[in-house]
């Protein structure tokens, strides 16, 4: 069994963050571990409040895991401030995990900011160069680069720009554009495109968390990066299609739909 570590915020409603990551690792046959960076009071409709974990406790959690358990892949999600980023960067430089997939969580599905704007430069200078894969959606890529991404050429240009900032590879998720949902991967040498028909579903809470965790899990299991992205896209497409009828807003995915294919989802 492969061991995967998530470094992210906690979602008390269970649909995103640490909870989504651990469900994904388990659903894909990996052992999941977690380092909590922020405790977020949120549900399917809104974010009420959040409390950042101190940098020293974030580092201690990382130390506890890495000094005891083999880590085959790391997924990074919510890093609320520069202190959290510096703590994570210090641990990654010390322990040098081979696979580091980072989903740059800037805002929640409900719209609330989850990363301090003043920490954006720290993220670009300390975290991005340590990532083997960065997985922003289009609004996140725009905020990180201070640009507009309106079409396929813009997506490729943004991926190349983020690669130039030090990321080992970049996957830009194209779900915010019109038409089919097409994600574009630049693996450091060439581009790969992954397209799926758009799914008419409101169960999209935690999609970014789930996709990045799935990529990390599939890479940990020995798949190449392009293969891992393709497998993760297939997995998350099914999880959205089987989205659960839970909550009043953007409901959660069904991370375990492959284990329980006959249970009812969201109509």
Image (cartoon, grey):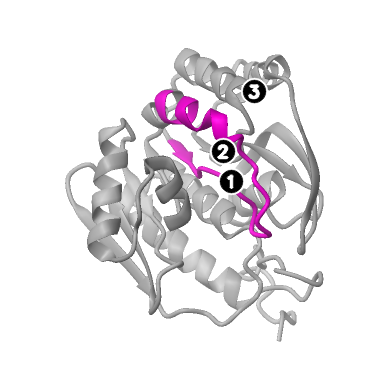
Q: Which mark is residue 30?
A: 1
Mark 3 near mark 1, Cβ–Cβ under 8 Å? no
Q: Whole-Å distance between the Cαs marked 2 and 3? A: 11 Å
Whichever of labels 2 and 3 marks the residue nearer the N terminus, that label is 2
57 up-or-down from 142: above or below? above
| Crowd class of label 3 (few under 14; some 14 to 19; many from 20; radius 10 Å) | some
- Foreground disc of the pair 3, 1: 3
Q: Residue at x 32, y 40 (%)?
A: 162
Residue 187, can we see it?
no
Whichever of labels 2 and 1 marks the residue nearer the N terminus, that label is 2
Of 175 and 15, the residue lying toward us: 175
Whichever of labels 3 and 1 marks the residue nearer the N terminus, that label is 1
Q: Residue 4 carries which label?
A: 2
The spot of residue 215 in percent (x, y) is: 46, 50
The spot of residue 237 in percent (x, y) is: 51, 71
The spot of residue 226 in percent (x, y) is: 31, 53
Q: Which residue is drawn at 39% across and 53% down?
A: 228
Mark 2 near mark 1, Cβ–Cβ under 8 Å? yes
Quick one: quadrant of the C terminus?
A: bottom right
- The residue carrying mark 3 is 65
Q: Which residue is drawn at 66% across and 66% down?
A: 253
Q: Which residue is drawn at 56% across and 45% down?
A: 105
Q: Whole-Å distance between the Cαs marked 3 and 1? A: 15 Å
Q: Whole-Å distance between the Cαs marked 2 and 1? A: 7 Å
Q: Is residue 231 left or right of residue 210?
A: left
122 up-or-down from 138: above or below? above
233 up-or-down from 38: above or below? below
Which of the 4 image quarters holds residue 100?
top left
Q: What element carries label 1?
A: loop
Q: Give the range drawn in magenta.
A: 100-125
């Amino acid at each position: 069994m492969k061991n995967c570590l998530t470094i992210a915020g906690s979602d008390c409603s269970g649909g995103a963050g640490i909870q989504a990551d651990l469900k994904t690792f388990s659903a894909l046959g990996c052992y999941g571990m977690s380092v909590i960076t922020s405790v977020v009071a949120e549900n399917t409709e809104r974010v009420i409040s959040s409390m950042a974990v101190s940098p020293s406790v974030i580092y201690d959690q990382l130390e506890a895991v890495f000094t005891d358990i083999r880590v085959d892949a790391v997924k990074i999600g919510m890093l609320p401030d520069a202190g959290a980023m510096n703590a994570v960067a210090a641990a990654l430089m010390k322990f040098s995990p081979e696979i580091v997939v980072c989903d740059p969580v800037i805002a929640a599905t409900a719209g609330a900011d989850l990363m301090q704007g003043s920490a954006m430069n720290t993220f670009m200078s300390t975290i991005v160069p340590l990532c083997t894969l960065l997985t922003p959606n289009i609004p996140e890529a725009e905020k990180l680069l201070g640009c507009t991404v309106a079409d396929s050429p813009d997506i490729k240009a943004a991926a190349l720009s983020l690669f130039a900032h030090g990321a080992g590879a970049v996957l830009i998720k194209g779900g915010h554009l019109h038409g089919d949902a097409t994600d574009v991967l630049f693996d450091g040498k060439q581009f790969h495109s992954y397209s799926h028909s758009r799914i008419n579903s409101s169960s999209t809470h935690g999609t970014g968390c789930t996709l990045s965790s799935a990529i990390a899990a599939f890479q940990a299991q020995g798949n190449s990066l392009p293969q891992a992205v393709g497998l993760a896209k297939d997995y998350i497409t099914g999880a959205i299609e089987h989205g659960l009828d839970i909550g009043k807003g953007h409901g959660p995915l069904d991370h375990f739909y492959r284990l329980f294919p006959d249970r009812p989802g969201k109509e």
